[in-house]
Image (cartoon, rainbow, N blue to C red):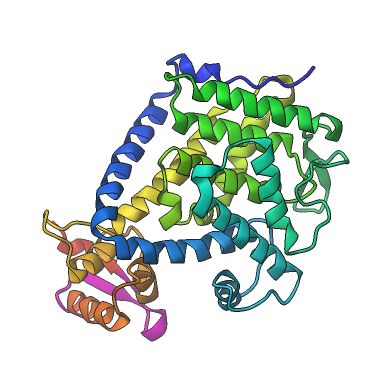
Amino acid sequence: MMRKFDYSFLDNGLLPANLISITGSIYSLRTAAGTRKEEYAQVFTELEAIAKLQSVKSSNAIEGIVTSDQRISEIVNQRSAPFNHNEAEIAGYRDALNVVHSGYEHLSFGEHDILALHKTMMSVAGYEFGGQYKVTDNVIMEIAADGTRSVRFRPIPAEQTEHAMQQLELAYLDACSNANINQLLLIPCVILDFLCIHPFQDGNGRISRLLSLLLLYKNGFDAGKYISFEEQINNYKVQYYEALRQSSEGWNTNENDYIPFIKNFLSTLYMCYKELDKRFAVVHGKKVTKTARIEAAVLGSLTPVSKAEICAIHPDISPTTVEAVLGRMVKDKRIKRIGESRSSRYIRNDKNLT
C-alpha cells in the first residue's frame, strides 16, 4: 500500500478547539511583533544575531553535534574555519540557515530547493551524498536504557523516495491553494510527512527544522528569526520526540494522527512569539524604557533568571545597567536574590505582589 499525501482533513472544521485558540494567540502576538519591528529595528537586528547562534547550536545539539559556545560564535560569525568534523557540520548548518534567512522569498518547498539546501548543509563536512536522496533504506532506531535496539519507524524505501517527495510537494501546493486551510496548521503536517519519508542518508532532522523556518517565514511568521525556534525544540526535546512518535504511528498505512505533532509545533512557535513579546514588555502602556524592560524580564519570568540571561534578552542594555536595576529591585523587595555572586539568580517576590 502506497502512502498518500492529503491535507484536506484540515478543511473540515473539526479541529480541536485548543488548536484554534493557540493559532489565534500566535496571530495576535505576530501583529504586536510587526509594529515593534518598525520602531525598534536595531533591537531586532541584535536579536537576530543572537538567535542565529542559538539556532546553529541547538539544531546540531539535538543530533549530538556539539562544540563550545565560543567556537559556535567564531564559526557562525565566520571568524574561524572549522577545526574538526563536528565543527564542519555546524558550519554547514550556518550556511544553510543563512540561505533560508536571506533568500526565503525566492525559495520554494520543492525538490530542487530542498536538495540544494541539503547540499549546502552537507558540503563543508565533505559528504559526497549531499544534495542527493538516500540510496539505501534507512530505519529510525530506538535504544532502550539497557542498550537493546529496536526499530521505531520504517521510513519510505529508498527506491520510492523521489516519487514520495514529488507527491508531498504537490499535496502541499494543492493545500496552499485552498483558502479554507490555515497555513499554520498545514506546515507541521508537511514537516511530519517529510520526517516520515526521511529522504536523506543523513541530516533529515536538521533539514526538517530549516524547512520549518522556510515555510513559516514564507507565510509571515518570522519569530524564529529573532528567538531561536530550534532552541525551543531542543529545550523540550522529550515532548518533541513524543509528539513525533505519536503522529508517525500508522503513517505507512495512512492511518496516522497529525494532531500531536501540530500541537507540539504550534506550542514551539507560540513560545518563540511569547519570548519575543517578553523582551518588549510595555509597562502600563508607556514607551519602554531600559529600566522597564529589565524589570519586565524578571517580573515576567516564572523561573529564576540570572543577570547573564537578562543581558542576553536585552543585548542593547549594558551589564552595568542591568546590575543597577536588579540591585534596586532587590532593595525595594520587589524581587529576591537566590544564590551568591556569579551564580545568583533573581525571581519576583510574590509575597510582595498583592
The quadrant of the image that shows the N terminus is top right
Q: Which residues are magenta?
A: 331-346
Query: Could one spot residue 334 in this view of the protein?
Result: no
Which residue is at 53% across, 17% downward?
A: 9
**In the rendered image, which quarter contains the C terminus?**
bottom left
1 left or right of 10 in image: right
Give the x, y percent position of residue 298.
28, 65
**Residue 331 against residue 203 in the figure, above or below:** below
Residue found at the far front of this picture: 106
How many marks do you count on the picture?
0
Q: Is residue 104 above or below residue 167?
A: below
Does residue 155 show up magenta in the picture? no
> Is 338 within the magenta?
yes
The residue drawn where x is 75% and y is 74% is: 84
106 and 60: which one is in front? 106
Q: In the drawing, does residue 72 fall left or right of residue 320?
A: right
Outermost residue toward the top in this view: 12
Q: Could you tell me which residue is drawn at 37 percent across and 85 percent down?
A: 341
**38 or 71, nearer to the observer:** 38
